[in-house]
Amino acid sequence: MWAETINQGRRRIPDARSLAYARLPQSCGTKTVQKKIETMEYILYEQKGAYAVLTINREKALNALNSQVLDELNETLDKINLEEVRALVITGAGAKSFVAGADIGEMSNLTKAEGEAFGKKGNDVFRKIEEFPIPVIAAVNGFALGGGCEISMSCDIRICSDNAVFGQPEVGLGITPGFGGTQRLARLVSPGMAKQLIYTARNIKAEEAYRIGLVNQVISAEVDEAGNVVKTAQENLLAAAEKMAQTIAQNAPIAVRNCKKAINEGLQTDMDHAIVIEEKLFGDCFETEDQKAGMGNFLEKDKEKKLKVVPFKNR
Ligand code: DAK
């Protein structure tokens, strides 16, 4: 419940449904709403029509992940209205850092058991992101180190500003990556490249991250002819991430969700089983209102009607 007191009474969260929202033009055919939820100390969450932006907001510590950030992130994910929100952008506050890792101060005195519990807390929330029923885009603004690189890798898609720096520096701190880094980096790039980056603890810049396939796109500032910055890389990054989220949100949600499931689950198994997973999820789309509307739109002979965007209903 939004209204319940969280984190040992640190702060009360208002009831999201009771918050006022303003109407905004939105073309995706879903509810045209913008909701700003007064969330927690370290997480900002804003629903913009059919997509939402979640910001890790601990700028003074370069958005490092302590237990409270992880708890609040977990809780915010649980409260997202999946009837309305069809894509999620995750970013960090400020232009310098997406997430500079797990909180080293908090980790420094952990016992073995506490370290394991901390690892589980992070892994549970990152896994939740990975399996979230809607696509999640990481808009990586600056440092994505350790747990920061790991949270970005639990997202479906990564795009970054040209000042982004990725890395798994854990072995330099006497630990292994603990939030899935050894597993997801090896799957995303290649085992050899992941091993090199993890064993050497070498940070890489945005262009190299792009070259090895860790990010889909690198976004720069817009500069006018006189060399003045018209839009910062951070602004362009968020605009690009939001545009991508909006584009995804316009497509049939059940189909998009099933694509995510098919790709994620299929990658964990052999091709014979993966194809069966795809068949089941493909079949699952039929007889939905959205499948009928989407195909009906294509088959429409009337050119005027045919051009209209199908307002998919998530049914
Ligand atoms: N933790 C805590 N505070 C951090 C932080 C972090 N990871 N990164 C930055 N900060 C804080 C700094 O302490 C500083 O705080 P004040 O001194 O102002 O109070 C503030 O953010 C600004 O940082 P700097 O002054 O250092 O800023 P610079 O521009 O000079 O340097 C930097 C930026 C990102 C290069 C530098 O801050 C840095 O190297 N940060 C640490 C990056 C890092 O090593 N990240 C990986 C953390 S290890 C596991 C579970 C989880 C994990 C592993 C295992 N298991 C359970 C097995 C995860 C591990 C990690 O993520």
Image (cartoon, rainbow, N blue to C red):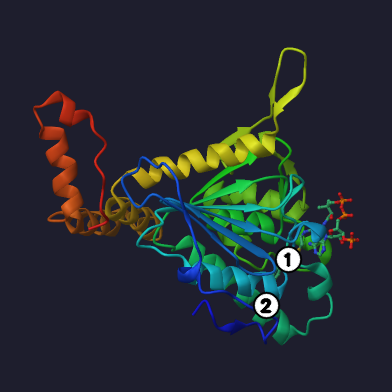
Distance of mark 2 from mark 1, alpha carbons? 10 Å
Q: Residue 236, percent across and down?
A: 62, 34
Q: Tell me the kind of residue under disc 2.
A: Phe
Per the image, the residue denoted by label 2 is: 118
Identify which residue, 249 or 216, lies in the foreground: 249
- Position of residue 293 relative to residue 67, above or below, is above
Identify which residue, 11 or 163, lies in the foreground: 11
Looking at the rendering, which quadrant does residue 114 occupy?
bottom right
Q: Are marks 2 and 1 in contact (CB under 8 Å)?
A: yes
Number of labelled discs? 2
**Mark 1 CB within 8 Å of ligand 1:** yes
Q: Tell me the kind of residue under disc 1.
A: Ala
Label 2 residue SS: helix
Q: Residue at x 60, y 65 (%)?
A: 38
Looking at the rendering, which quadrant does residue 177 occupy?
bottom right
**Mark 2 CB within 8 Å of ligand 1:** yes
Residue 129 visible in the current orientation: yes
Question: In the image, 85: left or right of 38?
Answer: left
Quadrant in the picture for the C terminus? bottom left
Q: Crowding near pointer 2: few (<14 within 10 Å), some, many (20+)?
A: many
Quarter of the rendered image showing ligand 1: bottom right
Q: Residue 175, percent across and down?
A: 76, 68
Q: Earlier in the sequence, mark 2 or mark 1?
A: 1
Looking at the rendering, which quadrant does residue 180 occupy?
bottom right
Q: Residue at x 77, y 13 (%)?
A: 226
Question: In the image, 156: left or right of 272?
Answer: right
Residue at the limit of the structure toward the top, as seen here: 225
Label 1 residue SS: loop
Per the image, the residue denoted by label 1 is: 102
